[in-house]
Amino acid sequence: MTIKTDALIVGAGPCGLFQVFELGLLGIKADILDSLPNSGGQCTELYPDKPIYDIPAVPVCTGQELIDALHVQIEPFGARFHMSEEVTVVEQLDDGFHVATDNGTEFHAKTVFVAGGVGSFQPRKLRLPEAEQLEGTGVHYKVRDPARFQDRNVVILGGGDSALDWALALWEGASSLTLVHRRDEYRGAPATVAALKELEAGSKLRMMECAKATALGLDGDRLATVDIQITDSDPETLPVDDLLVFFGLAPKLGPIADWGLEISKKAIEVDTATFQSSTPGIFAIGDICTYPGKKKLILSGFHEAALAAFAAKALIEPGKKVNLQYTTTSPIMKKRLGVEED
């Protein structure tokens, strides 16, 4: 079934979330999607605990606190979220765009807003010769269905929250589970590390530190073994049915490069009056867009979202005047926000 929407926002970082707000004030309900499992973009993936000092009227907040506050702010507008989905197809129609994702979700959108930061975040890949051909069968960079790892030999590579959390979630149902990390210090939550170390004693869970995968072994076209080498030791061959790789994420322009938009230095060129791209109806805001004098600040992205919303309103409702109203005085705005009149 195709989802019909007036506005499809690609990217659920701070600018994408604020785009929901600006569209909502104008009476436009949005759908928002992201290739990551959670909203927040760089704020939550790269610096959730680091302080931000340049958000107007907020002296200091962390990246995660900013995202949490934006979620509260957009709650009245009921945006539909579609997470862990990456856009693979964008086709222009007479009345908007056909958009499809790698999960098979399809949209008919009147307008599209690209708010993907510096592009979609792609998993850092395992650089072993057989890894690419095994991707999706024996080598995995995300977990879509935890049940598929039931009663299987699982090896997890990584030392961040994703690796630790999935080790904790999957160990009980797996036949065996080995967590392999290249250091003896972890980037993930200390409480999760402590829980895993406690489970390791006398169980089918094993933790290998200061170690890395050096080779994959196949049985026909199926993953069968992985060689793990601890520093200054000979490699140990482990049986494995599924290898989960969590080496972190890297920003890449990704499929956006194939949308037919004018791109300069890996960013989408826009008209600063509307923040519309070279394709009418597709807007770009935040770090993904470029124009003379562009500054890659969250503050700039919020401004861009406001102007893009007004331009989109004119496209979605052609012939109607788009009036500038203020949330302090407009009964319509207050109604949309769910604010009671004094």
Image (spheres, rainbow, N blue to C red):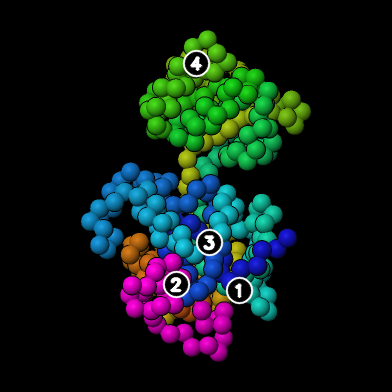
In the rendered image, which residue does mark 1 sit on? 110
- Label 1 and label 4: CA atoms lie apart by 53 Å
For the residue carrying disc 3, how many other residues have a C-alpha within 10 Å: few (<14), some (14-19), or many (20+)? many
Looking at the figure, which quarter contains the N terminus?
A: bottom right
Residue in the picture at 33% in, 64% down: 299
Horizontal side of 342 relative to 118 (left or right) equals left
Label of residue 79 in the image: 3
- In primary-sequence order, the first of circles 1 and 2 is 1
- In primary-sequence order, the first of circles 3 and 4 is 3
Helix, strand or loop under label 4:
helix
Q: Is residue 83 visible?
A: yes
Outermost residue toward the front in this view = 342
Instruction: Determine whether label 2 and label 4 are within 8 Å by CB.
Output: no
In the rendered image, which residue does mark 4 sit on? 200
Tell how many labels: 4
Q: Is residue 235 visible?
A: no
Relative to 28, residue 169 above or below: above
Label of residue 290 in the image: none
Helix, strand or loop under label 2:
helix
Helix, strand or loop under label 1:
strand
Helix, strand or loop under label 3:
loop
Q: Provide residue 142's location: percent of width, then percent of height.
A: 58, 40
Magenta residues, as a range?
313-342
